[in-house]
Amino acid sequence: MMGLESKSEIGFRGILPFVSTLVLILVMQLQYRLFFLDNLFPYLSLAAVYYWCIFKPRLMPVSAVFLLGLLQDIISGGPLGMMALLLLIVRIFVVRQSSRFLEREFLFNWLVFIMVALVFGLATWATASVYIKETQNLWNALGQSIFTIAVFPVVVLLLGWVRNMLVTENR
């Protein structure tokens, strides 16, 4: 049965995690004219990488995470390699701990995500400050992390729907 699952994940279904994360990265880069979203749009790519590395880590390999992070850096105009590096660190952490995550309920995964998102925001702030050689606004980074934490259940719901497409097609 394992061989059938691997064969059925080849092709478009196999790249759904990559494509869904790419779509979220593009959504992050859209220009919204809402006064409170100008600097506080959530790290949707973080939520997607976290989710896929728990449930389908083989479909979100290191190379895909690196490419997604690099694309995000290029599209956003941020420090080149910053998101690639930070998302890779998240992937390594989640994959190494995934057996603990899969045995838990959503609330536990969300609590772990809260810690990951806060550290991610601080790391983004620190990296950008060093790169630009000027201290960035810490409150913006923390605000983005908090906003990311708040929208995480919605992202999980959407990505769960995509993941069910993978499972449904495997039957």
Image: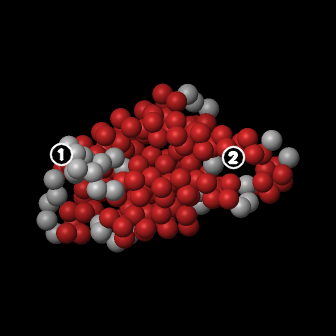
Quadrant in which the C terminus is drawn:
top right
Q: Residues within 10 Å of mark 2 (few under 14, many from 20)?
A: many
Q: Kindly tell me whether residue 89 is visible in this rendering.
A: no
Seen as rendered, the residue at the extreme left is: 134
Please give the name of the residue rendered at 40% of the width and 44% of the height, measured from the top-left corner. 116
The answer to whether one can see residue 134 in this image is yes
Label 2 to label 1: alpha-carbon separation: 38 Å
Helix, strand or loop under label 1: loop
- Give the quarter of the image for residue 78: bottom left
Task: Please tell me which residue lies in front, 34 or 159.
Answer: 34
List x then y, in percent, for residue 138. Answer: 18, 50
- x, y (%) of residue 92? 52, 55
Which residue is the site of mark 1?
A: 35
Residue under label 2: 166
Q: Amino acid at mark 1?
A: Phe
Taking the image as shown, residue 15 lies to the left or right of residue 37, namely right
Up-down relation of residue 80 to residue 145 (above or below): below
Residue at left offset 39%, top offset 37%:
151
Residue shown at 16% from the left, 58% from the top: 136
Under mark 2, the amino acid is: Leu
- Which callout, 2 or 1, points at the residue further toward the start of the chain? 1
Q: Position of residue 101 (x, y in %)?
A: 56, 37
Residue 72 percent location from the top left of the image:
40, 64
Which quadrant would residue 64 be assigned to in this image?
bottom right
Q: Secondary structure at mark 2?
A: helix
Q: Residues within 10 Å of mark 1 (few under 14, many from 20)?
A: few
Mark whose residue sits in front, 2 or 1: 1
Specify the label residue 15 is tagged with. none
Q: Residue at x 52, y 36 (%)?
A: 157
